[in-house]
Amino acid sequence: QVQLAESGGGVVQAGGSLRLSCAASGRTFSMYAAGWFRQAPGKERQFVAAMSRIGGMTSYVDSVKGRFTISRDNAKNTVYLQMNNLKPDDTAVYSCALRSTGYNTDIYTTQNEYFYWGQGTQVTVSS
């Protein structure tokens, strides 16, 4: 069983930056592809970014391309989401997710493809 813990959320003004972290338990972190999702009040959870287990393949929702960067440090069992030039529309609870995979470069962009989820961290962007 893998447990995930997000951190780094907070309140920031539009145009500001935050870096979210997601620390995972266990010793086989490199076997998992990772993703970040977000859910704004009254809306469905939305895919934000994903990264392959190794190989550096990434995918982003169009609305964050050029502003957000997903990365990971397998030695630290941690995946990150660097968020720059934040906008009020980015306000949401951000959750990380992992799924095991035998493929180095596969990425997953739908929530149903993930096995493990964190509790989420609130990001609020004021105008």
Image (tube, rainbow, N blue to C red):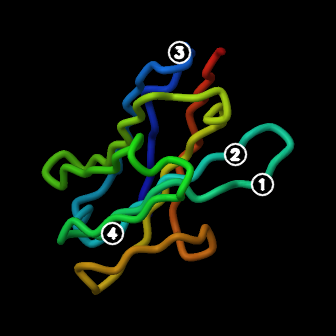
Question: Which numbered disc, 3 or 1, marks the residue closer to the eye?
Answer: 3
Position above or below: 119 against 112? above
Q: Earlier in the sequence, mark 3 or mark 2?
A: 3
Residue holding disc 2: 39
Residue holding disc 4: 32
Q: Is residue 29 left or right of residue 81?
A: left
Provide residue 101's location: percent of width, then percent of height.
35, 81
Provide residue 88's location: percent of width, then percent of height.
65, 27
Residue holding disc 3: 12
Instruction: Report how far apart the C-alphas of labels 3 and 2 lie in the structure.
Output: 17 Å
Provide residue 75's location: percent of width, then percent of height.
13, 51
Residue holding disc 1: 44
Identified at 23% across, 80% down, the residue is 104
Q: Quadrant of the N terminus?
A: bottom left
Q: Amino acid at mark 2?
A: Gln
Residue 27 figure quarter: bottom left
Please report contact status of discs 1 and 2: CB closer than 8 Å, yes or no: yes
Question: Which numbered disc, 3 or 2, marks the residue closer to the eye?
Answer: 3
Question: Which numbered disc, 4 or 1, marks the residue closer to the eye?
Answer: 1
Instruction: Report how far apart the C-alphas of labels 4 and 3 lie in the structure.
Output: 31 Å
Identified at 59% across, 42% down, the residue is 119
Nearer to me, 24 or 7: 7
Please report contact status of discs 4 and 1: CB closer than 8 Å, yes or no: no
